[in-house]
Amino acid sequence: MAKIGFGILGAGLVAPFHAKSVRDAKGGALVAVCDVDKARADKFAAEFGVKTYNELDAMLADPAIGVVNVTTPNHLHHDAVLKCLAAGKHVLCEKPPAMSLRDTDEMVDAARAAGLKLGCTVQCRVRRCVQAMKSAIGQGRFGRLLHVDTYMKWHRPAEYYHMDAWRSSRKSGAGVTVQHAFHYIDLLQYLGGDVRRVDARMCNLAHQDVELEDTLAAFIEYRNGARGVVQASTALWPGTDIRIEINGENGTAIMVGETIATWKFRDDQADDDSVRAIGSKAQATAAGGAADFGHHDHRVVIQDMIDAIREDREVVIPMATVRHTVEIALAMYASAARNAAVDLPLDYDTPIWE
């Protein structure tokens, strides 16, 4: 069976994680990279042994490419994804899908109309700890959910925000809420369910040379009655591992990095000890550096894209399922701007980036 060809659009920081994942997956082949920065594209192409393009249209004309991984700056995702879909390519798009709900919906609708796969790399969903938590919720082991929280206390040096021009631009999606914490806001809705209200505050604690928030504190209310806290920052040296905490009337589970730190339920089950052994504390999870993490989770998502195309089924993380995460993040910006709680659903025309 012929391998499915991949092209990567954008040769920036996250692109090598996609390239390594395609290389390690079964049934896929990395064909090309495209970046408007010729030197960066050529360097990437030499490292991974692929063709170089400097214009998206040229790469989309390559018949060897069946999937495009969109790893451009956040504000450029929408237009690129629509071009790829119009060219008949399946798409795996980095998070966040887009900078507005309208743009997110346009991409989802375009993929559906074209009969093409459209996935989003919120790859933390496939982490074994998260899947164990998701399974326990589905089994009803927590009982009524009471609190589902996330704590992301990271560090990024000033240089991070000046690696590329867009990283210091609020309108480009460089703030901690939509850029870094997006993964973990996504896990909250994936595990805790739909959110009905957010009350958020934002500030810049340690990066005053850029006009965006490096710190977020938010209180959320889920539609199922549970509550949640979100703390996220890139200002806190040296950076500590992400924590996801789930508290229910019958159990508590806490994920730290890629490990289960707490797994306690009123009703013990035979496999609980194996769940407690999940993960490795040695695996970096980007707490102290932008590229300090492994590519295993990306590989799972990319392998699934290959399998989904061959089996003609939905991908493991459809972009449509990430829409609510976009909505929550946008509502947090709206709440911080108003200094008041914001109810969801969020209106299309709610001003965010003005």
Image (cartoon, rainbow, N blue to C red):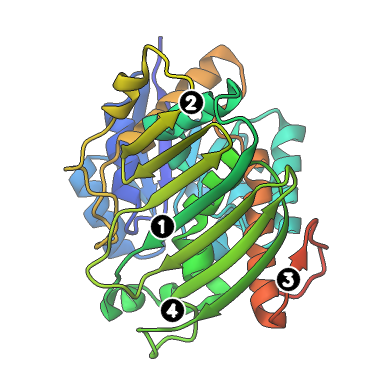
Q: Name the element at disc 4.
A: helix
Q: Earlier in the sequence, mark 2 or mark 4?
A: 4
- Of tags 4 and 3, which is closer to the observer? 3
Question: Considering depth in this image, is 157 or 278 the residue closer to the camera?
Answer: 278
Return the x and y of residue 302 as percentages of the image width and height. Answer: 42, 31
Q: CA distance from mark 2 to mark 3?
A: 35 Å
Identify the amino acid type marked 4: Ser
Please, is residue 29 above or below residue 26 in the view? below
Q: CA distance from mark 3 to mark 1?
A: 44 Å
Return the x and y of residue 299 as percentages of the image width and height. Answer: 35, 32
Tag count: 4
Question: Considering depth in this image, is 224 or 109 the residue closer to the camera?
Answer: 224
Q: Are marks 4 and 3 in contact (CB under 8 Å)?
A: no
Residue at 29%, 80% (x, y): give it. 158
Q: Disc 3 marks which residue?
A: 341
Q: Earlier in the sequence, mark 3 or mark 1?
A: 1
Q: Earlier in the sequence, mark 2 or mark 3?
A: 2
Image quadrant in which the N terminus is located: top left
Q: Name the element at disc 2.
A: loop
Q: Are marks 2 and 4 in contact (CB under 8 Å)?
A: no
Q: Disc 4 marks which residue?
A: 168
Identify the amino acid type marked 2: Arg
Q: Disc 1 marks which residue?
A: 54
